[in-house]
Amino acid sequence: MIQTIRKAWGVPELRKKIVFTLLILLIFRIGNAIPVPYINTTLLGNYLDSMSGTVLGLYNVMSGGAFAEATVFALGVQPYINSSIIIQLLTIAIPALERLARDGGEAGKKKIASITRYATVAIALLQGFGYYMICKNYNILEQQGIWPALVIIVSFVAGSSFVMWLGEQVNEFGVGNGISIILFAGILSRVPNMVTMGASYIRTKGSIGCLWIALLIVGMLAMVVLIVHVNEAERRIPVQYAKRQVGRKMYGGQSTHLPMKVNMSGVLPIIFAQSIASLPATICAFVPKWQNGWVMKHIFDTTTWPYIVIYFLLIIFFSYFYSTIQFNPIEVANNLKKNGGFIPGFRAGKPTSEFIQKVLNKITLFGAIYLSVIAITPLIISACSKAEQLTGISLGGTSIIIVVGVALETVRALEAQMLMRNYKGFLN
């Protein structure tokens, strides 16, 4: 990865793209340090610390702590991610949107992108209003009234819209996926604070503290290695194309393969499952008397075993749900049949689609179990010990998957850019 970045830096045009991307990230970090007026950030930080197992805690992690600081970019990329997921699901559910995405060409893509932008603003408006109501109900506001409410909500909506625009600028003039890179930067911004807390723990505990920190770091590295291997893994189904004669020329006859990613759904099943599993805790956050109830303490608390089991099952369910939406075996089989391709040992049409569906179910199960293990390992560690509270180092499976996935995606984008410029030797 480092070698690829170094060689990309040697290409003047790619160097400009990298510098532009870094400039966008600098603007994003500056925006994360600009506070919104009329909010007591100390009281807000204390409140969100108690809500670490809810959707609010998830938003705080994804924004790099900006959510707890009530900055202009507090909502971060969450409204855009939510709107993208909603529009993607609606594209499958609504025939008109499906036709627009499939047959609309470049104009159809622009139309769907425009719809996604409007949906982002609408979701940011709802989330900004919800943010204001939380601050109002828990006496976190420094001043009450219509004007403070308007300033707070408009600031959050404008900040979220500006972050979306920054991501689009990276897509056009920078390197990689802009929204993913901004999310990547937000998660990594928490690393210095984790290092500081870890160093403080070592000074307090001495050699025992060093042992705990070393174990946590080894665990992180092991998770990174596992994530890299599974992200790059794919099941290759052999495909043979029949020979056909057109005029005096013979076409086809070559052998190739149909690649199927083991983890084709990425981190989305974890995000969906985390949002659903933390919904009861989020509802209880708005009703203080419910927070100390038996159900909340023994079932929906993130350190309890019932919550871990529910979380595990939800990840498996959403993995199958998303792979079913993303990959259509019948359509793939029909495309192979139209192009004269077939899978050796299976007739074209229904037998081919059934075989592809069988393979899809197997690799989806493996990918779902992999995501579940990555996601629940930190919860099991927290349930069995107080490692995160004592050391300040969090083994967030979701965060690690996002960071590693974005890093691999960005490196592949750099390699593709160099390949288009006939740059040789970077694959060695």
Image (cartoon, helix red, strand yellow):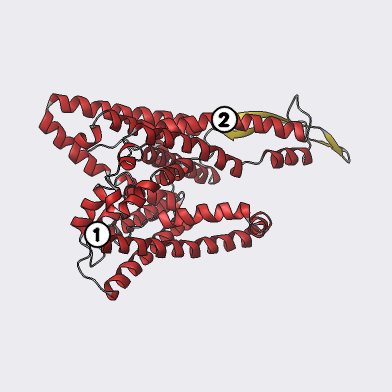
Q: Is residue 377 above or below residue 301?
A: above
Where does residue 6 sit, x and y in percent of width and height?
38, 41
Where does residue 125 sit, x and y in percent of width and height?
40, 65
Q: Where the N terminus falls, by quadrant? A: top left
Label 1 residue SS = loop
Considering depth in this image, is 360 or 287 the residue closer to the camera?
287
Considering depth in this image, is 300 or 212 the residue closer to the camera?
300
Question: Pointer 1: what residue?
Answer: 138
Q: State which tag comes first along the sequence, 2 or 1.
A: 1
Question: Pointer 2: what residue?
Answer: 363
Horizontal arrangement in the rendering, residue 384 relative to residue 416 (left or right): left
Residue at 40 percent of width and 49 percent of height: 181
Horizontal arrangement in the rendering, residue 238 relative to residue 15 (left or right): right
Which quadrant holds residue 215? top left
Residue 428 visible in the current orientation: no
Which quadrant holds residue 4? top left
Residue furthest right as drawn? 247
Residue at 52 percent of width and 35 percent of height: 263
Using a 10 Å C-alpha cutoff, classify the residue at mark 1 as few (fewer than 14 neighbours), some (14 to 19) or many (20 or more): few
Residue at 30 percent of width and 26 percent of height: 218
> Could you tell me how far apart the alpha carbons at marks 2 and 1 are, in whole angstroms?
47 Å
Give the residue type at disc 1.
Answer: Tyr
Label 2 residue SS = helix
